[in-house]
Image (cartoon, helix red, strand yellow):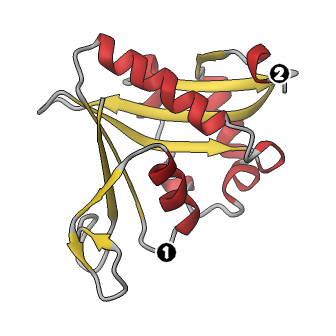
Amino acid sequence: MHMATEQISHCSHADFLAIRKNIENYWGSDRTLSVHHPMFIFEFGNSAYVIKEKQEIIAYLFGFLSQTSPTAYVHLVGVHKDHQYKGLGTKLYKHFIEFAQLQGCNKLKAITSPTNTQSISFHQKLGMSLIGELEENGLPIFKDYSGEGQDRVVFEKNI
C-alpha cells in the first residue's frame, strides 16, 4: 500500500481553484460547489489540507476551529473518485485532529445530510457519535440545523 508516501500539505489558492474546477471528481456532481468558499483558504488556511499524487489533488479537508468552544469542525472532506476507500479521508481527519489538539480543542464536530449514507457510515467508522432527535427511520437528526426544513446529521467526538 502506498499510504506512507502520501504527504499532507496546506491547501493553496491554486489547489482550491483546482478542486472547484474538478468538483464532480470528488462529489459525483457539483452539489457542494456553493459550500466550497474561499474563506477556508484565506481565513482558515492553516486547517485546510490536500493530499496530492503526481501534482494532482487526490483528497482534501477544509476545517476550522470554533471561536465559541474548544471544538474543531470539519466542513468538507473530499476524496477523488479514483482514490476512494484507500484511507485518505481518515488520514486527513487524523492530521486535522492532531492540529486541533495542539490548539487546545477537545471535541471534533461535522455534519451531513440525512440522505448521505456514505458520509454517515464514514463518520461512524471514525468513532463519531450522531447527536440529535430520533427521526422516524431511527436516524438521529438535528431538525432545521441548516434552515427551516434542512435537517442535518450532527457528529461529535471527544478528542
- Residue 121 percent location from the top left of the image: 53, 59
What residue do we see at 54% from left, 52% from top? 122
Residue 107 against residue 81 in the figure, above or below: above
What residue do we see at 59% from left, 28% from top? 91
Residue 149 against residue 97 in the figure, above or below: below
Q: Earlier in the sequence, mark 2 or mark 1?
A: 2
Amino acid type, callout 2: Gln
* Front in this rendered view, residue 98 or 10: 98
Residue designated by label 2: 55
The reply to whether residue 143 is in sight is no
Residue at the outermost left position: 68
- Residue 115 percent location from the top left of the image: 49, 74
Residue designated by label 1: 115
Amino acid type, callout 1: Thr
The nearer-to-camera label among 2 and 1 is 1
Badge 2 element: loop
Image quadrant assignment for residue 104: top left
Disc sitting over residue 12 in the figure: none
The reply to whether residue 53 is in sight is yes
Q: How many marks?
A: 2
Residue 59 against residue 119 in the figure, above or below: above
* Front in this rendered view, residue 146 or 127: 127
What residue do we see at 50% from left, 26% from top? 94
Image quadrant assignment for residue 1: top right
Cα distance in 3D space between marks 2 and 1: 33 Å
Image quadrant assignment for residue 32: bottom right
Badge 1 element: loop
- Residue 52 percent location from the top left of the image: 76, 24
Q: Are marks 2 and 1 in contact (CB under 8 Å)?
A: no
